[in-house]
Structure formats: C-alpha cells, structure tokens
Amino acid sequence: MDVGKGNIMFRQRRRLWYKKYDMRFRVIGYVRVSTEIQKEKDNSVRSQIKCIKKYCEDYEYELVGIYKDEGVSGLKSNRDGLNDMMVDIKKSKVDMVVVYSLSRLGRKLVDVVGWVNGLEKLGIQFVSIKENFTNNGVMGKLMMGILGSVNEFEVGVLSERIRDVKQFKKSNMEVYGGKICYGWDRIGNKLIINKVEYDILVEIEFYRMNGWSYNRIANYLNDKGIKSKNGSDWYSSSIRSVLNNGVLKLGD
C-alpha cells in the first residue's frame, strides 16, 4: 500500500470515529509576520491563515481560533498574540496548535524548543506545516532532541562570541603585528569580523561538538573547496589550531 492510499484510509477511519462519538479534533492556529517580511507572499498573514485552514480541512479538524502577531520580530520572545494563545490554551480544551512554519513561532531556537516542550507537557500536539514537523511520536521526539542539541550549540557559540567581544573591547580592537586567527581580518591596526570565515568557524565547532574527528572536518572542508586562512588545504592540525587558539593570537 502506498502512502497516499494509507492516508486516505486513515482519514476515512478517523471520520467514522468522530461521527460515532460526536468528537472533533480542536485546533488553534498561530501566524506572525515581521515588518521586514510583510511583503513576502508566502509569509503574509493571509497566506499563513489559508495554509492552516486548508490543513484543518484536509484532516477534518475543527479550527477554533487563530492568534496573530503582525509587525513583530521573531527574535522577540514577549509577543501579545503568542502570550494570549499560551494563556487561552490552558483554559480551553485544545488538541493541537498549528503554524505555517517553525520560523513563524520564533527565530530564537531556545524559545521555540521551550514553547513546543510546554505544549507537550499540556498534552497538546504541535504541527509545523512547511517542515512537516510534529512533536507527536518517536520522530517528533527525535527532532526535538536534535533541535535541543542545536540550541545548546548556539548558546555556546553566543557565549564565546560575547567573551571575544569583551576581549577586543579591552584591547580597543587594536593589534600590532602578530597572527590573525581564522574568522577575523585586519585593516590597518583594527580587527574586523570576516563573516564568511566566522560562519565556517561556527560550522567547524558544530561538527566537532557532534563527534567529528579533526581529519573528517578537514576532508569535508577540502571537498567543499573551502580554503584555510593562508589559502591552503585543511589538515587535522589546522582544524585543531583554529579551535584551540581562540579568535585571535597575538604575537609570534
């Protein structure tokens, strides 16, 4: 049996179950747009609501309400629409919360993971249509574990960046001679972030934290055609160096 026929049979059985016990699966939708993306068609409030409504129609769910945050950045944790939704779902009988995509729920992974885990503790299923993600079942728990791990990584990287910024402020961001580490460039006596290298450095740290050997990371970068600071290929020793020496190494 193919997936399509299996889904049809599942929906038919569920329809009979609901009719027999006069039950409806109650769903709340959440939509958000920030000021800089309001003009993007696929992320507009109208498009998000349309997708959520279609999802509920396809699965014969009862859409009991939609909460909105318009012109609000996903980096902002305290949002009126989201706060109202979280308060109301604790008061009413709701089975599921649906969003168009995970990015609509939030741009900070720590917040997204926290909200989804909070829904699970309340016995409420969460679905993101675009990513075909749900917190229900084994795969959902696996995905939440992965998101949690990535979140811990992002927090660690953020802490390192804050520490680096404090170090540079202390030295007035000035260097005289010495070796500039991967992720930074020097213009005159001033240091500036090399965004391309810094993003690659973050990627290196991520793979290392997930158990990759120095040699495997070096081969991965070489296969992608990414060069080291001096334009040469990567080796296990150079990977170890950029990770152990920090952002900047002063002096020879």
Image (cartoon, helix red, strand yellow):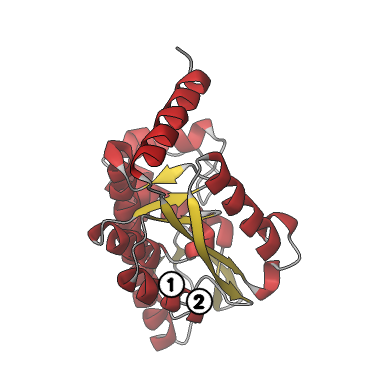
Q: Is residue 22 above or below residue 64?
A: above
Residue at horizontal 48%, vertical 77%? 76
The number of callouts visible is: 2
Residue with the most extreme left position: 121
Residue 85 image label: 1
Does the rendering let one see residue 23?
A: yes
Where does residue 158 sit, x and y in percent of width and height? 38, 69
* Residue closer to the observer: 76 or 151: 76
| Residue 180 rendering spot, x and y as whole percentages | 47, 64
The quarter holding residue 212 reads top left
State which quadrant residue 193 falls in: bottom right
In the rendered image, the quadrant that contains the N terminus is top left
When the figure is inspected, residue 115 is found, relative to residue 138, above or below; the finding is below
Vertical comparison of 189 with 6: above or below: below
- Residue 28 image position (x, y, % from top left): 47, 61
Q: Is residue 112 left or right of residue 208?
A: right
- The amino acid sitting under disc 2 is Gly
Q: Which mark is residue 81?
A: 2
Mark 1 to mark 2: distance in Å? 6 Å
Give the answer, above or below, for where 74 lies relative to 244: below
Contact check, label 1 and label 2, Cβ < 8 Å: yes
Location of the C terminus (image quadrant): bottom left
- Answer whether residue 246 is visible to the viewer in this image: no
Instruction: Give the class, few, some or many, for how many residues have Cα within 10 Å of label 1's Cα (few <14, many ≥20).
Output: some
Residue 211 vs residue 68: left or right? left
- At 52% from the left and 59% from the top, the residue drawn is 103
Viewer-closest of 163 and 179: 163
- Which SS class for mark 2? helix
Q: Position of residue 231 (x, y in %)?
A: 56, 45
